[in-house]
Amino acid sequence: MVIIRRVTIDDLPVVAEMMHDALDLYYEGDHRAHAKRIVQTSVQGEIDTKGHFSAAQIMYVAEEDGRILGVLNVVVKYQGTLKISPLFVLEEARGKVSARCFSRRRKSARGNTMPARCTRRSR
């Protein structure tokens, strides 16, 4: 069963490699360093002191049997808007992990500190 939970500092090596692998072909820059900054920001209270346009970073991971399958980062902008950046799911996990899973985590956070569980619905 896939669970959605807040990122921890222990997740950093996996998240950094996933970000690098997902973005390096399309965008320039040090994606591992960017992952480090946003994971640390999310873990250390969410307030983004280094982002030019972002006030906070809130990151979640999708995990199954201890393996991270996907990452969702919510960026709180100074204008009061939210932006999802990045969102990526390992190719072999697509269909197991979806936006529905991450949205269930958000809803369950209102008074429930347990990670959300996401199971694939039959069609």
Image: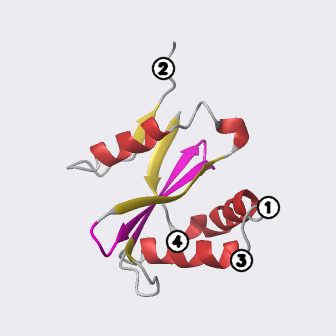
Residue 39 location (% of width, % of height): 52, 71
Residue 76 magenta-drawn? yes
Dot 2 or dot 1: first in sequence order is 1
The residue beneath circle 2 is: 121
Q: What is the CA distance from the residue labelled 1 to the residue labelled 4?
A: 21 Å
Amino acid carrying label 4: it is: Val
> Is 51 situated above or below 112?
below
Dot 2 or dot 3: first in sequence order is 3
Q: What is the CA distance from the residue labelled 2 to the residue labelled 3?
A: 38 Å
Q: What is the CA distance from the residue labelled 3 to the residue labelled 1?
A: 11 Å
The residue beneath circle 1 is: 25
Residue 43 location (% of width, % of height): 44, 72
Say few, some or many: other residues with alpha carbon within 10 Å of mark 4 (under 14 / 14 to 19 / 20 or more). Answer: many
**Which residues are drawn in magenta?**
57-80
Dot 3 or dot 4: first in sequence order is 3
Question: Marks 2 and 3: CB-CB under 8 Å?
Answer: no
Secondary structure, mark 1, is: loop
Residue 37 magenta-drawn? no
The residue beneath circle 3 is: 29
Question: Marks 1 and 4: CB-CB under 8 Å?
Answer: no
Secondary structure, mark 2, is: loop
> Is 120 situated above or below 88?
above
Q: Residue furthest top?
A: 123
Label disc, if present, on residue 57 of the rendered structure = none
Please report the residue visible at 65 percent of the width from the left and 79 percent of the height from the top.
Answer: 33
Q: What is the CA distance from the residue labelled 4 to the residue labelled 2?
A: 30 Å
The residue beneath circle 4 is: 39
Amino acid carrying label 1: it is: Leu
Secondary structure, mark 3, is: loop
